[in-house]
Amino acid sequence: MTQPEFRAEARPKRYPPPQFPPRRPALFARMPPAVFPSLLGLLGLAGAVRLALGRLGWDPGPGDLLAGGAVALWAFAAFAYGVKLARRPGVVVEDLRILPGRSGLAALTMGGMVAAGLVAAYSVPAAAVLLVLALVGHGMLAVLLLRLLLGLPPEARAVNPTLHLSLVGVIVGAAPALAVGWGWLAETLFWVALPIAVAIWALSLRQFMAAAPPAPLRPLLAIHLAPAALLGSVAGLLARPDLGVLFAGLGAVYAILLAVAGRWLLEAGVSAFWGAFTFPLAALATALMVNGGVWFWPGLLLTALGLVVIPLIAWWVLKRWPGGRLAAATNAAEA
């Protein structure tokens, strides 16, 4: 009689016991790029306030104070992300894989361009250096993003509003370029950004007609407003009033559509994606005031609205940075 064959069962995989106290990431190792869209909104708001006070002939002190605070906040956040990047350079590609990281990194370098314009009032050389660094950084991020997208399957390369930030965001550098005396650069950035913005608008409209975005992503639709407003501002500064009024008017019409669809737009509730409302609002206010005439007063009203809305959204986002809540909610990569 043969003995029954016994087989030893494989031992269950042993997992290490949980650490106590829980492991804490190194300083700034999981810095969330999602803070930068709101900071870009604050920087744009400072520029709009400065412009409004100047056009009204009022004391520029409040605008300078707001500009100083916004530039300081952006510089601190940029330093924090620089520390994260220095720990592990490959983390930037991981952040580019997700929408909050993709829009945040583009807003980081766009914020550097706006900061350069604000700093130009005090030091043109410092503004020029900051502008060049921001434009170079923005170009490098755009190349990395394009390489990443080309390596994905076709269904994962769908057009979304954040492409405006990565591929059209260079238009933000046009106004600072004029401030440092580089008119040729402002012209170049305008004509480079214009066809790309139009292409993204067209592709996005076709995609929207096929399927509306899910509720959590709907706030990103506000980003489509930013290129129109920025192109309107730059056209006005370049003494092209027809184009300036055209794009400023286009931005105003789109803003009205967003306001009408507000309940649908905000259906998912407050999230870090609400930062997408901040910089288009500031950009539209600036565009309307730059083009002046009948547009000035609506621009002034939007600036007043921005003084309430933009800091509230920025505060909601920034207070979730310490402790890692924002990083967890936006799936920020860890260095």
Image (spheres, rainbow, N blue to C red):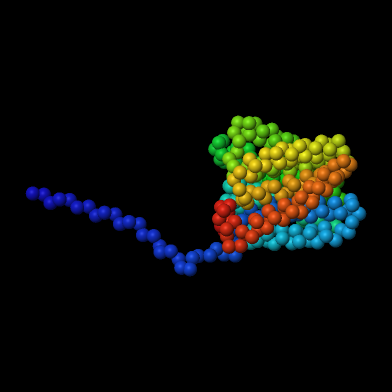
- Is residue 61 visible in this depiction of the protein? yes
User: Between 112 and 258, which is closer to the camera in this rendering?
Assistant: 258
Quarter of the rendering containing residue 19: bottom left
User: Between 38 and 101, which is closer to the camera in this rendering?
Assistant: 38
User: Between 297 and 82, which is closer to the camera in this rendering?
Assistant: 297
Point 58% across, 62% down: residue: 323
Quarter of the rendering containing residue 120: bottom right
Point 74% across, 39% down: residue: 256
Furthest toward the left, the residue is: 1
**Is the C terminus in the top left, top right, bottom left or bottom right quadrant?**
bottom right
Furthest toward the bottom, the residue is: 21
Q: Is residue 210 left or right of residue 70?
A: left
Instruction: Check the image and report above or below for 114 versus 26.
Output: above
Point 57% across, 58% down: residue: 325
Instruction: Check the image and report above or below for 285 versus 88.
Output: above
Residue 187 screen position, x and y as percent: 83, 42
Instruction: Check the image and report above or below for 199 versus 94.
Output: above
Q: Is residue 317 left or right of residue 153?
A: right
- Is residue 39 visible in this depiction of the protein? no
Residue 293 screen position, x and y as percent: 89, 42
Residue 63 screen position, x and y as percent: 82, 58
Q: How many marks?
A: 0
Quarter of the rendering containing residue 224: top right
Point 59% across, 56% down: residue: 326
Residue 229 screen position, x and y as percent: 77, 42
